[in-house]
Image (cartoon, rainbow, N blue to C red):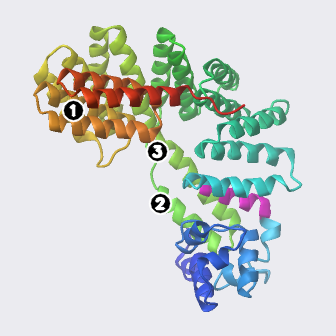
């Protein structure tokens, strides 16, 4: 962690200095952006949400009549050898590595197109094979985030060709990500092949990365589910959960992030890279809770379809597990499934209790699959009580979440279910409208990206 003296040396942030210099020149953000950058990129820098690459700093400084050093640090400090942090940068970290870090940060912030632009610039440079592999891996993630799946498939396939003969530690992760792309494209057999190859490598390496192992098993489970291999899917989801049980909650993300930003502003880039990478690692671990609840979502659904008695035993046992007691989203998923089970058996008191517990466990504004389940179940419960206005509201809010998530297969099924309930209560026109929406959702689910 930086000392008090280090804090005093940080001075104004890059974003603050950039905004100050822009206003002094009476430039708008659009004028500073020019043809090379977006206004949103300039705005994000000035708000301190992202740090620009060194190349971008040089361009901005040129337009503002400054040097990039003027924007980088307000008080360049001399080291023991009399060389400033900025001047010693070349000896400490290559600009390529710094730009790559910035692209990763943009990726984590959901700025996918910005990350794609930054990574595309890097690929035009003279790089080592190791760098080319890693850049393509990160670029594949950015393309997935931007829903540019065919481009993701292309760049990850190139990464596989570069990595498979060199014992590269990223190779299993590239295979997994390529499997995810094929699953998203509804190429489930190909997705399954890549996921299996990845899992074989991890077993050979005796990997202890339980978060990654959980994700690979989950990917295989989703492929098996889509191919209607339900017993295989159940086993894979169970293996995924066993991996999650060995994970602990990640803490101190904000502290690591702020420390990394502080070191970057005083041009101590090796330490900035170190703390930002720790931040990214912890963010990955925190995602384990939402992933665990997603596993329970699919696992519970398959169990309910196969054997309700077995499903009830599994769900009630899962509620009592200490690891799940610390995870409100997983608890909400379990209560939602139990609510659905009791509702299907007309045990309305038990159903109402579990459905309300699921709803109360969700954070306000939750936009997850679990939240969609809970809302649609509240709609069903309201319909059984002939509270149709409330029921319609719950149904439509739950369907809207599925639509935002792009979960078109589930959306189509739930739209058909809602249409049937509408028809039963005599609202035929609205029922027809939702049947049309269900057809459109099914078409969206079956679409393939252009080959």
Residue 254 numbered tag: 2
Looking at the rendered structure, the secondary structure element under dot 2 is helix
Q: Nearer the viewer, residue 221 or 378?
A: 378
Residue found 78% across the figure and 64% down from its top = 95
Q: Position of residue 428 (x, y in %)?
A: 24, 26
Q: Which residue is mark 1?
A: 378
Q: Position of residue 106 (x, y in %)?
A: 60, 57
Q: Mark 1 or mark 2, which has the lower sequence index?
A: 2
Q: Are marks 1 and 3 in contact (CB under 8 Å)?
A: no
Residue 422 vertical placement versus 266 (above, below): above
Report the side of 23 relative to 331 (left or right). right
Q: Which residue is mark 3?
A: 286
The span shown in magenta is 93-106
Residue 362 numbered tag: none
Q: How many C-alpha atoms fall within 10 Å of the one at disc 1: few (<14), some, or many (≥20)?
A: many
Q: Quadrant of the N terminus?
A: bottom right
Residue 197 vertical placement versus 292 (above, below): above
Residue found 73% across the figure and 37% down from its top = 156
Report the side of 225 relative to 418 (left or right). right
């Amino acid at each position: 962690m930086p000392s008090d003296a280090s804090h005093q040396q940080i001075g104004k942030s890059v974003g603050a200095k950039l905004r100050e210099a822009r206003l002094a020149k009476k430039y708008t953000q659009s004028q500073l952006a020019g043809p090379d950058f977006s206004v949103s990129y300039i705005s994000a820098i000035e708000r301190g949400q992202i740090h620009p690459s060194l190349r971008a700093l040089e361009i901005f400084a040129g337009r503002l009549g400054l040097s990039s050093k003027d924007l980088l640090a307000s008080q360049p400090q001399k080291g023991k050898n009399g060389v400033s942090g900025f001047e010693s940068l070349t000896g400490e970290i290559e600009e390529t590595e710094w730009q790559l870090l910035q692209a990763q940060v943009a990726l984590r912030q959901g700025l996918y197109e910005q990350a794609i632009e930054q990574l595309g610039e890097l690929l035009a440079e003279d790089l080592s094979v190791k760098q080319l592999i890693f850049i393509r891996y990160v670029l594949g993630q950015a393309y997935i985030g931007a829903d540019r799946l065919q481009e993701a498939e292309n760049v990850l396939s190139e990464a596989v060709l570069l990595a498979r003969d060199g014992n590269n530690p990223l190779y299993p992760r590239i295979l997994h990500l390529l499997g995810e792309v094929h699953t998203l494209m509804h190429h489930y057999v190909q997705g399954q092949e890549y996921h299996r190859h990845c899992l074989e490598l991890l077993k050979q390496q005796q990997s202890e990365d339980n978060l990654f192992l959980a994700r690979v098993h989950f990917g295989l489970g989703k492929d098996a589910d889509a191919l209607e291999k339900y017993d295989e899917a159940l086993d894979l989801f169970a293996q995924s959960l066993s991996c999650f049980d060995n994970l602990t909650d990640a803490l101190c993300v904000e502290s690591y992030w702020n420390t990394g930003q502080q070191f970057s502003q005083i041009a101590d880039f090796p330490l900035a890279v170190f703390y930002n990478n720790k931040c990214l690692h912890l963010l990955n671990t925190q995602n384990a809770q939402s992933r665990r609840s997603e596993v329970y979502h699919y696992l519970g659904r398959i169990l309910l379809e196969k054997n309700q008695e077995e499903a009830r035993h599994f769900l009630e046992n899962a509620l009592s597990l200490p690891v799940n007691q610390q995870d409100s989203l997983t608890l909400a998923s379990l209560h939602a499934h139990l609510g659905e089970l009791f509702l299907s058996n007309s045990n309305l008191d038990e159903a109402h209790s579990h459905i309300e517990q699921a709803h109360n466990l969700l954070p306000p504004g939750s936009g997850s699959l679990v939240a969609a389940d809970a809302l649609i179940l509240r709609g069903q419960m309201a319909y059984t009580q002939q509270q149709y206005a409330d029921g319609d509201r719950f149904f439509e809010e739950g369907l809207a979440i599925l639509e935002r998530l792009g979960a078109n297969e589930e959306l189509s099924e739930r739209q058909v279910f809602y249409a049937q309930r509408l028809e039963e209560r005599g609202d035929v026109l609205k029922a027809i409208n939702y049947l049309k929406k269900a057809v459109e959702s099914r078409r969206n689910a079956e679409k393939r990206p252009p080959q």
